[in-house]
Amino acid sequence: MCESKLYLIEGDDRKLIMEEAVLVKKKDSKIIAVGLLGQREDIEGANIVEVDSDRHMIIIKRD
């Protein structure tokens, strides 16, 4: 499987938002993330900063 950890950067802090994200997409002014078991997180005002498929990590940041 190809799940990734989803992190949100706010200021100097990096917070784990989702352990096993299988879908992360930008829609309007938010990031929508869906987990392996169907859980969903909507993060307002964020953009994707980095996708590291080798380390299974996605980093997003609020504007």
Image (cartoon, grey):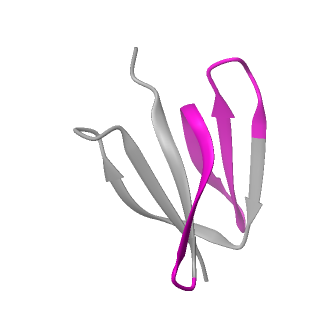
Q: Quadrant of the C terminus?
A: bottom right
Q: Quadrant of residue 24?
A: top right
Q: Is residue 40 above or below residue 25?
A: above
Q: Is residue 15 magenta?
A: yes
Q: Quadrant of the N terminus?
A: top left
Q: Position of residue 55 (x, y in %)?
A: 28, 41
Q: Is residue 2 above or below residue 11?
A: above
Residue visible at 67% across and 33% down in the picture: 34
Q: Which residues are magenta?
A: 11-40
Residue visible at 53% across and 48% down in the picture: 6
Q: Position of residue 58 (x, y in %)?
A: 44, 50
Q: Main secondary structure of the magenta part?
A: strand
Q: Quadrant of residue 35?
A: top right
**Side of 46 relative to 22 (left or right):** right
**Observer-nearest residue: 27 or 9?**
9
Residue visible at 73% across and 59% down in the picture: 43
Q: Is residue 22 above or below residue 40?
A: above
Q: Quadrant of residue 45?
A: bottom right
Name the residue furthest left.
54
**Side of 33 relative to 39 (left or right):** left
Q: Position of residue 23 (x, y in %)?
A: 56, 34
Q: How many marks?
A: 0
Residue visible at 52% across and 63% down in the picture: 60
**Side of 24 relative to 50 (left or right):** right
